[in-house]
Amino acid sequence: MVIQDGGAALSVKKITNRPIKFATTGEKLSDIEIFHPERMTSRILGMGDVLSIIEKAEEAFDKEEAIKLEEKLKKQSFDLDDYLKQLRQMKKMGSFSSILNMIPGLNKLKDVKIDDKEFVKIEAIICSMTAKERKEPRILNASRRIRIAKREWNNCTGYK
């Protein structure tokens, strides 16, 4: 049985007298995860779920890439290609709002609305840039910005 709401989990367990095996934080298949009662309790009480974030990060992030990124940050050579890779790895973890809900304290910020579609727009903008523009964003003048805004995202789907 897959349960999305913590309160519903208690009710369903009581009525069916069956164990809950999976829970979901959203509507996609990637949002289904193994049910851990203590983690669900932490989420319900607003204490976050750091262990689930760590597990998702371990699945989504490549350790070698993380080491390369760390070196780039130390050398201050982080560019938009690196940012795009990070965005795509974050998407593997699930929706940004579901990740924020697992961070202790942040799940209490009800007035903060995160629209994951905005990240798709950011990805499209970066993909519409030339390699040189992604490496050196300071060269973006008005005409380049207009070209980027007009460019379609079709060429981005194969971008690595």
Image (spheres, helix red, strand yellow):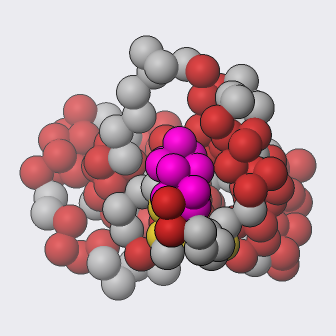
Which residue appears at 32% of the width and 54% of the height? 120
Q: Is residue 58 above or below residue 10?
A: below
Q: Is residue 90 left or right of residue 8?
A: right
Q: Position of residue 157 (x, y in %)?
A: 30, 78
Residue 8 magenta:
yes
Q: Residue furthest top?
A: 111
Q: Position of residue 106 (x, y in %)?
A: 65, 26
Q: Nearer the viewer, residue 12 or 139?
A: 12
Could you tell me what secondary structure mostly forms the magenta stretch? helix
Q: Is residue 7 left or right of residue 75?
A: left
**Residues in magenta, as a range:** 5-14
Q: Nearer the viewer, residue 2 or 113?
A: 2
Q: Is residue 8 left or right of residue 17?
A: left
Residue 59 visible in the picture? yes
Q: Nearer the viewer, residue 46 or 2?
A: 2
Residue 60 magenta:
no
Q: Position of residue 111 (x, y in %)?
A: 43, 15
Residue 87 visible in the picture? no
